[in-house]
Amino acid sequence: MVQPLNRLKESASQTAGPYVHIGLTPNFCGIEGVYADDLGAAMVNDKTRGERITVRARVIDGTGTPLKDALIEIWQADAAGLYNSPSELRGAADPNFAGWGRLASDMETGLFEFSTIKPGRVPFKDGRLMAPHITFWIVARGINLGLHTRMYFSDEQDANAEDPLLQRVEHKNRVPTLIAPRDGDVYTFDIHLQGEKETIFLDI
Amino acid sequence: MSNERPETGAFFQRDRQWQPPAYTPGYKTSVVRSPQKALISLDNTLSEITGPVFGHSMLGALDADLIHNFAKAGESAIGPRIIVHGRVLDERGKGVAGALVEVWQANAGGRYRHKKESYLAPLDPNFGGCGRVITDADGSYCFRTIQPGPYPWPNGVNDWRPAHIHFSVFGHGFAQRLITQMYFEGDPLIWRCPIVATIPDRAAVEGLVAALDMQATIPMDARAYKFDIVLRGRRSTLFENRLEGN
Ligand SMILES: [Fe+2]
């Protein structure tokens, strides 16, 4: 016998189901008057520093159909590359930018539109800079455990080329699944759950 | 909290034998929504170690009272009154302070207040179905609601969900993000449910079944169920190489 480690196991995940809106975006689904606003719906205000951008995302299933009942949360650094978090020890992030957003997909089109700012670069563990990126967490009916991925920016080619995570990808032909093309101030990020264009998901 | 070392460690690797796999054909919707390629494994970076903070000040007075937070003045939701309480812990067994816990559920008849919902059981005009709470310094939380009913759902021709409350939990790091469901002790539908059955390990399912807690019950008012939630634990950074300035 040895001494027990006494660790607990993480609670098992269960799907968010089709009615995730009731809990996480109640105003969006017509349950008004319980919470003043849906959390994470507005990410920037007049004083937020940084370049305003729109991230237009869709989550697409294995038949090519956009999910109309998905929910996405995003998490990102501010324009200077600082996270607004107690675990951020490099400096104080922009007080006018929480860096966290949450939206449900449009119930007709499956579109998500996050109005945010372009994040700065954040160091990897070894001090090399990662390319600017936004972390995505995707839940929906039929997804048993929330999916983690990242969106990178098409106009950051040099930074993307030296990004430690992108460099880590063995099949380079899959790297473009993480890079959102830019058109004006809109970045389009299609997340494919399956198939030829399956997005790289992270065990992170 | 101010005397504690800042939490800068990476989270323990997720046990993917314990968590449900993505592809679970018994739960049909997962078939075309499950990634098929291997996930890319990577130790946490700052992007996963960090996470937003939710302050108690954002909460409304009735946020944790689903019996009243949608009800007309002087009225209340119909159904068996219950208290749900417990702690949010990490895998080290430490309470997670300041965790945002958001819940949603069907009404006592098993009907959700949602435009995509078509079950013939009636809506309760006094029940919205959402609530939220932020954990105390020791990770404890508590809310009041009515016990939801089981409901049928289109999967097999006669599949029923056991009574359950959906939980979304936000710990301190974005990599801890978790959505799960709480079930009720003694419900025979638990072991017949294709969504429950996506979890491969029986002990992991039992970890989602809340116990009737008579000690926390309020006599002549509400029964109580105790439900603890465990989030990923964090590695100690004591002997890890850290960036300059950390
Ligand atoms: Fe449900």
Image (cartoon, coloured by chain):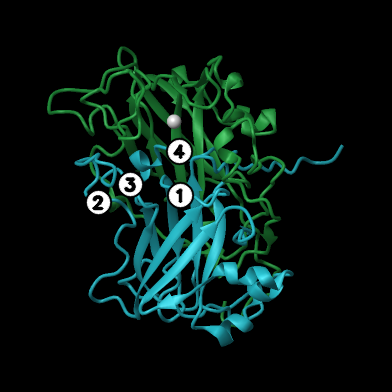
Chain colours: A cyan, B green
Q: Are marks 4 and 2 on the same chain?
A: no
Q: Which mark is residue B167?
A: 4
Q: Quadrant of ligand 1?
A: top left
Quadrant of res B103: top left
Residue lying at the far right in this picture: please name it.
A1
Mark 4 or mark 1, which is nearer the start of the sequence? 1
Q: Which mark is residue A37?
A: 2
Q: Which residue is mark 1?
A: B97
Q: Amino acid at mark 3?
A: Thr
Residue drawn at x 40%, y 79% as measured from the top left = A79
Distance from mark 3 CB to nearest ligand 1 atom below 8 Å: no
Q: Is residue A32 visible?
A: yes
Residue lying at the far top in this picture: please name it.
B220
Q: Which mark is residue A25?
A: 3
Q: Are marks 3 and 2 on the same chain?
A: yes
- Cα separation between marks 1 and 3: 23 Å
Q: Is residue A128 visible?
A: no
Image location of residue A144, percent across then percent down:
57, 41
Residue drawn at x 53%, y 16% as measured from the top left = B187
Task: Decide: is A16 above or below B154.
Answer: below
Chain bearing mark 4: B
